[in-house]
Amino acid sequence: MGEQGTLLRQPRRPGSTKMVENTNVQSRTWKRWVAFLLFWASSLIPFYGTLRALITLSLRDDRYTYIVVIPLISAVLIYLGRDRISRESRTCYPVALPALLFGLALFWIAEKQSTIGRDVGFCIEVFGIFLVWLAGFVLFHGLRSLRLAIFPVCFLVLITPLPAVFLDQVVLALQKGSAEISFVLFKLAGVPVFRQGLTFSLPGVDISVAEQCSGIRSSASLLIASMLMGHVLLRSGWSRIWLTLFTIPVVIFKNAVRIVTISWLGIYVNADFFHGRLHHQGGLPFSLLALAIMGSMLFVLHRAEVSRREDFVLEALGKTQP
């Protein structure tokens, strides 16, 4: 009996205690992720009609082709940062439940209300779905985890399509900007040109900067790429904002270079260039040009951040020295 009592009173090893605690933490973490995935999967049932229409819109309308890849990018980024996000996971009912109810109400009102127009109503429906998913994340992971995952979670808002009325104005602005820069490039290239609005009279041919020349699809792709590059490679919020805003002039310049290049080749080399593959399917070389410009801007912003950090460290060391 004495030996048994002695054995029962032996202290537990510190290593085994730590292993048990780690196992419990991992178990709770996986339960949270599984619960969130079940929440997300169950939400697909009431939202099935809207999500199906959203996928159809993305596949059929070139202006919205980017939408289908947004959830995939967001999911990959959350998965890559899951360990860091999970360390701060806490259930948060006070914030999540009102946000969930608001998202559901917004979805229901937009679906039933016909006075706001189907186009705008559909955009509000999708935004309501985003709010429901956002509330689900906060419900199972809390606000601290949301701060750590703020970019991939809020990146998902891009599934909300812009109303056609607003998007038409964006396309028109890109057309006008492309026409302005094209006129300057024609002059620099020595091509005789007479301009009336979006129409150019060139030697032997008239061309117009049509909606297809606005580059709205490549603009969306470049915008998404700039946001991802800024998130991964830059630390400063202002640097990320400047990189994203820099997309606008780069897209306009890229469109203008494409217009002037095809026109110059059509005038001085072969008229088939106006209707050939370079015109209809040759966007890749010009997109690579845009990426090269964006890469240069990214390098400049990154070097500026490094320089500021080095100056800060040197200043801190200078203050600590006697």
Image (cartoon, rainbow, N blue to C red):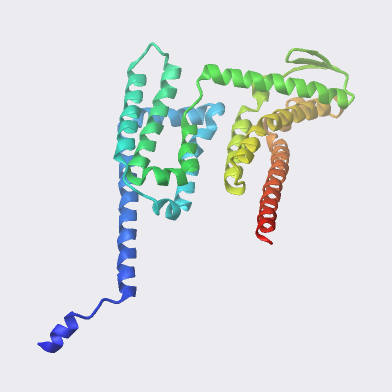
User: In this image, 82 relative to 189: left or right?
Assistant: left
Specify the quadrant of the image occupied by residue 167: top right
**Could you say which is closer to the camera, residue 5 or residue 205?**
5
Tell me which corner region of the image, top left, top right, bottom left or bottom right, holds residue 103. Answer: top left
Residue 159 vertical placement versus 7 (above, below): above
- What percent of the width, then of the height, locates residue 31? 30, 53
- Locate residue 234 relative to residue 96 in the image: left or right: right
Observer able to see residue 161: yes
Q: Is residue 159 left or right of residue 142?
A: right
Residue toward you, 193 or 11: 11
Residue 297 in picture, x, y percent from top left: 71, 41
For the question of whether residue 75 can be seen, the reply is: no
Q: Quadrant of the C terminus?
A: bottom right
Residue 172, given in percent of the width and then of the height, sits at: 64, 18
Q: Residue furthest left?
A: 1
> Splitting the image into 4 quarters, where does residue 224 fall?
top right
Please report the residue visible at 73 percent of the width from the left and 43 percent of the height from the top: 296
- Count every numbered label the image shows and give the total: 0
Q: Quadrant of the N terminus?
A: bottom left
Outermost residue toward the front in this view: 322
> Which of the two residues, 142 or 48, is positioned nearer the viewer here?
142
At a point 82% along the width and 29% down the height, the residue shown is: 265
318 or 313, which lies in front? Answer: 318
Q: Is residue 62 above or below residue 5?
A: above
Q: Position of residue 268 (x, y in %)?
A: 87, 27
Rendered residue at 70%/19% (across/down): 176
On screen, residue 274 above or below 296:
above
Residue at the spot 56% in from the left edge and 28% down from the top edge: 62
Left-right relation of 154 to 293: left
